Image (cartoon, helix red, strand yellow):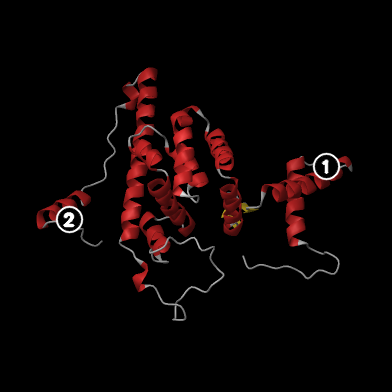
Amino acid sequence: MPRVSGSSTFEGVLIDWSLGQPVELPGLPVELLSKRQAAAELARRQRRQAMDAAYEAELILRLAELTPDGDDPQPGAPGTRAPGWSAGEDPVGVSEFFAGELALVLNRGRGTARHLHHRALAWRENLPATYAALAAGDLDVARAGALADVLGTTRPELARAVEARLLPEAVDLSVARLRARALELLAELDAVAADQRREQAKRRADVFLQPGHDGMATLGAELSADEAAEAYAVIDQLARLAKADGDERPIAAIRTELFSLLLRRPGGHGQPGVAAQL
């Protein structure tokens, strides 16, 4: 691992020594705690997780700062990313390879690494009060993340206006309700921005395949709400027709099979066969 240098030789040595220390997780003797004490310790750990998330975001932003795009291949050079394969989400000035490097550091997927970087940027640039509350342990990671998801791609001044109205009541709202309120306020304060956000979401949408357990996997896609509702209604209606026709399986199993059949179209009249390498 590369050596870390501070602003002086002494500081650099001290930082290197600190990073070389074993990771410890101090905690209370759980078996001795009362119910009240266990609950209090859980609440304290929630605050600690929030503070750790803010610190993690700060570290990610520092890594990004130290990974500029100056050495990236220029357009037309070997290794340049082909246009049309990305939604154009890479932050300006940061190497296009940063997500891969961060994924390696975190031992996570590139998509997760990119999400964490964008979330950190949203907190710093658009939601400074949210970031401060997170760092102080006053706002949990889930709620701070929901605000970043909704307000991270809009104009900073608009994001901060929504933040100012929502943050005082954020801890009293469920994560889903907080997200919904942020969207409502965004549309109320700037309908054009809400439309722009929807268009950006459409450009970022993708189909995903997520491995599961027991030989199963999840196949999904991000769609506009009306398209998703329409697609589900079609599958559900077909499943109910099959159920009424005597299919004794649970309706969820019928819906799942119909979803697979409609996509893979095995034996469809006049349609080419579909095959995949497993």
Badge number at residue 87: none
What residue is shown at x 38% (from left), y 39% (from top)? Answer: 129
Tell whether 162 sits left or right of 129: right
Circle 2 packing at 10 Å, graded few (<14), some (14-19), many (20+), is: few
What residue is shown at x 42% (from left), y 35% (from top)? Answer: 140
- Confirm or deny contact between disc 2 and disc 1 (CB under 8 A): no
Quadrant containing the C terminus in the rendered view: bottom right
Quadrant containing the N terminus in the rendered view: bottom left
Q: Does label 2 or label 1 sit earlier along the sequence?
A: 2
Kind of residue at badge 1: Arg
Tell whether 175 sits left or right of 44: right
Circle 1 packing at 10 Å, graded few (<14), some (14-19), many (20+), is: some
Q: CA distance from mark 2 to mark 1?
A: 66 Å
Question: Where in the figure is residue 181, as x and y percent of width and height?
Answer: 56, 35
Q: In the image shown, does 191 or 76 lie closer to the viewer? A: 191
Per the image, the residue denoted by label 2 is 6
What residue is shown at x 17% (from left), y 55% (from top)? Answer: 6
Q: In the image shown, does 258 or 181 lie closer to the viewer? A: 181
Query: How many numbered badges does the structure rendering display?
Result: 2
| Helix, strand or loop for disc 2 | loop
Q: Residue furthest left?
A: 10
Instruction: Reply above or below: 60 against 246.
Output: below
Per the image, the residue denoted by label 1 is 240
Kind of residue at badge 2: Gly
Q: Is residue 195 visible?
A: yes
Question: Where in the figure is residue 66, as x and y percent of width and height?
Answer: 30, 62
- Which of label 2 and label 1 is nearer to you? 2
Question: Where in the figure is residue 40, as x and y percent of width and height?
Answer: 36, 23
Q: Is residue 212 visible?
A: no
Question: Where in the figure is residue 117, as x and y percent of width and height?
Answer: 41, 54
| Helix, strand or loop for disc 1 | helix
